[in-house]
Amino acid sequence: MCIRRKGEGETDEAAKGRLVAWSLLRADYQEGMTHTVEECRGLGYGKRVAYGLVGKVLDLQRQRREELQHEQGDGLEDMLVPYCFVDPDNKISQEMFNSMGFVKRTRHYWTRY
């Protein structure tokens, strides 16, 4: 999910259509790599792209639940839950995801063997 600069009123041709905010959805449905370019921060673009992906995950959840209820019955509510990992030092992202209703559950560490 991304937001591109429209280019209206832009004199710099290279700036037209340039990405200004984006967020990715990994194969395991983790939302991540949410980013807004420096000059566009504070305009709500990061939250818009993050909400867009949350909506896609919830749509997938509804579709899967409908498909599987016929086969397995109820109890599928937690199949797909929007989630993300935020760097512990990234307070701005923590605040953004918290304002969207995400709840901090645990602290994760990455290691390299």
Image (cartoon, helix red, strand yellow):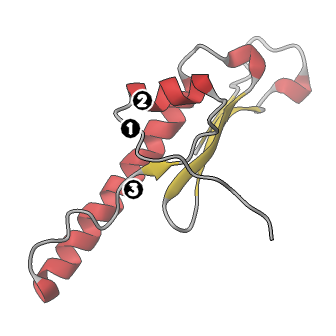
The image quarter in which residue 22 lies? top right
Q: Nearer the viewer, mark 1 or mark 3?
A: 1
Q: Could you say whether the residue bearing mark 1 is in a helix, strand or loop?
A: loop
Q: Residue at x 62, y 35 (%)?
A: 88
Report the Cα–Cα distance between label 2 and label 1.
5 Å
Task: Name the one closer to the observer, 94 or 1.
Answer: 94
Amino acid type, residue under disc 3 in the picture: Val
Rendered residue at 40%/51% (across/down): 82
Residue 63, image x and y in percent? 27, 68
In the rendered view, does 79 fall on the left or right side of 110?
Answer: left
Return the residue at label 1.
102
Position of the C terminus, as image quadrant, is bottom right
- Horizontal and vertical percent for residue 50? 50, 38
Residue type pointed to by label 2:
Asn
Does the residue at mark 2 contact the one at mark 1 (Cβ under 8 Å)? Answer: yes
Question: Element at badge 3?
Answer: helix
* Label total for image: 3
Q: Position of residue 51 (x, y in %)?
A: 43, 37
- Asked whether, in this view, residue 50 is left or right of residue 10, the answer is left
> Dot 3 corresponds to which residue?
57
User: Mark 3 touching mark 2, by CB under 8 A?
Assistant: no
Of the residues shown, which amino acid type is indicated by label 1? Answer: Phe
**Front-lying residue, 71 or 11:** 71
Residue 98: give its label: 2
